[in-house]
Image (spheres, helix red, strand yellow):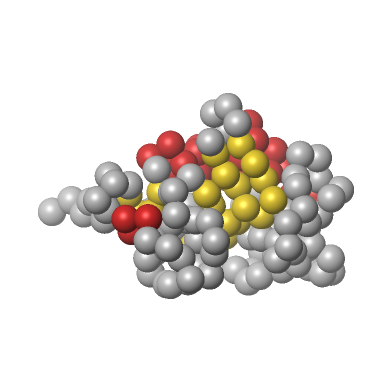
Amino acid sequence: MLEVQPQDSRGYFMLPQAPEGAGYYVYGTPENGASQYADPRLITIILFVEREWQLIDNRQFGIGNMSLADGVKHKDHSSHMKGLEVDVRPVRKDGRHQSVRYFDSDYDSIATEKLINIFQNFAPGKMRIYFNDNRIPGVRHRDKHDNHFHFEIA
């Protein structure tokens, strides 16, 4: 039988949990995709970015928290209830599926800027990106955004 992604009361689906051959891996709290429900527009953007990313780089990028099912308040975030936001890890030079801060030696600033540019290219209209590497055009500073960027669509 064909497995269908879990869906919440808003009609939002859980992001596919890193299917084989995907250009992304998943992380976040709580685990097992519980905080990866999103508006179909955001999931579509992520899947477009994932395909484009695979054309230029063989490393996977990390997709973290989006929204809990039904838009329940997230204990770790004041946002992430609308299903229009996603946390994404910066790219590591070694490609490991671990956190990295923008000032660490394993941080790949060039690749991370390319990834952010792809997200910007697929964003429909207004969007915001919070990330503390101010060398990347179009990102805004926000406390606690040294080890991930927060991408949000309107």
Indicate the position of residue 144 as horizontal and vertical percent values: 70, 66
- Please identify the quadrant where the N terminus is shown: bottom left
- Res. 5 visible in picture: no
Q: Nearer the viewer, residue 142 or 7?
A: 142
- Horizontal side, residue 1 vs residue 69: left or right: left
Please tell me in which quadrant of the rendered image residue 60 appears. Answer: bottom right
- Horizontal side, residue 15 vs residue 141: left or right: left
Indicate the position of residue 18 as horizontal and vertical percent values: 43, 58
Please tell me in which quadrant of the rendered image residue 33 appears. Answer: bottom left
Name the residue: 50% across, 38% down. 45
Name the residue: 53% across, 36% down. 154
Name the residue: 53% across, 52% down. 86
- Horizontal side, residue 78 vs residue 137: left or right: left
Name the residue: 43% across, 43% down. 43
- Res. 129 visible in picture: yes
Indicate the position of residue 71 as horizontal and vertical percent values: 37, 55
Q: Nearer the viewer, residue 42 or 91?
A: 42
